[in-house]
Image (cartoon, rainbow, N blue to C red):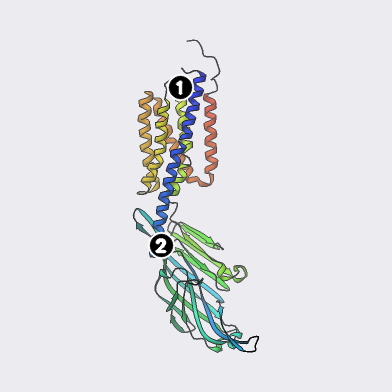
Amino acid sequence: MKTNSSLFFKIAFVALIALLMLIPLAMVKNQIRERQNNADNCRMEVSQSWGNAQTLAGPALVLSYDKTEKDADGKSVVQHLKRTLYPKTLQYEIGAATRKLHRSIYDVMVYNADVAATGTFVLPADCAELALTEACVRLDISDLRGIEGNVDFHLDGKDYTFSEGSSGERNEAAHIRETIQLDKAWMDGTTVLPFQLNFKTKGSESILVRPYGDLTEVRMHSDCPDPSFTGDFLPSEREITDQGFTAKWIVSQINRGKPDDTAFGVRMLQGVTQYRQTERSVKYGILIILLIFVAGLAVELLTRKEINLVQYIVIGLSLVLFYALVLSFSEFMAFPLAYTLAAAMTTLALLGYFRGILKDKKAWLLGALVAIAYAISYVLLQMETYAFLAGTLILFAVLAAVMYLTRNMNEPKAAE
């Protein structure tokens, strides 16, 4: 049986080996980040072709007019000015259907959306005094490639179809516009002009709306089960199920600030990606390695059979390889199945190794501990909010077990 001095050095070297395992764990983390970057690049390529995140703003009426003024020399100078009129009321109804596109081994979440906007305009009385050169209706949409088909606009009994677009050069937002006819009789500050706007769009990642109305109401529904509500306002009403979500926002000019400075909506998440889950699981890697190493030392004390340092290195590398297996499997199957398969392979391999080393029934105890450690790690992955607390309690339990096993190390051994 080892002396206290040799046992101390053995524990010190095993602890050093555990720390050295941080190096291959870091290599696995780097590989996860590289695969995540590949997935992000793939998503960007698909988005460039399908449509990027969409931000909708409008409709708004843009009045172009001339204003004549005298300069310092008394000459008449004509200024070409524009005035933007926002809706009095604005209601959006957005229905988004998500789908997955495949590029290489990666899945990219995109959506198709049906957009219907209704509301009213009230033209101020002073507009009648302007020397109008043009009046147009404008709709800002961040990625014009996402528009499918015509964009139809109906204003007070007249139908229009947008025919001009700009992708946003010269620091101007991407938009579409259509020239319309405004009657001077409408410019009295009281006449209510109802409008309706309908179009289809597609995009990826998110869909946001700018509250252009004095009172803006947005209703959105989708089959996306993992939405993330984002922007300057959260929905006043929401309902999320496994079949999708519905949400409603109500924003007034009192709390919106400038219309173009505010936006809100939803990000269409693809759940927690396998890369994020794998990266989170690697964070518990050193904890599992310490658990198994401490258990190995305890079994050595109980069975008086030695696990040498080289074998500890092999055990540690096997525990690290588990995360590489999870990463590679999760790219082709659901993360829970990938995790279970990798855990089963690693546990069986280590069980056979423990039996070959110890040639004792306690090898089954070590194998069971490996399986339990992976099960606990998976539970911690699902907890998220309480993961740190649970992990700390587990470390305390390990410390208590070590204290219990080493409590009698300084007592003299009974004569045999």
In the image, 175 versus 204, the foreground residue is 175
Q: Position of residue 309 (x, y in %)?
A: 43, 27
Which of the 4 image quarters holds residue 67?
A: bottom right
Amino acid type, callout 1: Leu
Q: Look at the image and tell me whether residue 101 can be seen.
A: yes
Relative to 177, residue 42 above or below:
above
**Res. 274 mark:** none
CA neighbours of label 1 inside 10 A, class few (<14), some (14 to 19), many (20+): few
Q: How crowded is mark 2: few (under 14 residues within 10 Å), some or many (20 or more)?
A: many
Determine whether the residue tagged by mark 1 lies in a helix, strand or loop: helix
Q: Residue at x 42, y 49 (%)?
A: 34
Task: Inspect this view and state whether residue 378 appears.
Answer: no
Point out residue 94 in the picture as x, y percentages from the top left corner.
46, 68
Task: Measure the C-alpha gap from mark 1 to mark 2.
Answer: 60 Å
Contact between marks 1 and 2 (CB within 8 A): the answer is no
Which residue occupies the foreground of this view, 16 or 59?
Answer: 16
Q: Name the residue under label 2.
A: 47
Location of residue 316 in the rendering, given as x and y in whole percent from the top left corner: 42, 33
- Tell me what residue is drawn at x 47 percent, y 22 percent: 301
Label 2 residue SS: helix
Which residue shows up at 49% across the image and 20% down it?
6
Q: Mark 1 points at which residue?
A: 302
Q: Nearer the viewer, mark 1 or mark 2?
A: 2
Q: From what the image shows, is residue 281 above or below residue 72? A: above
| Label tally | 2
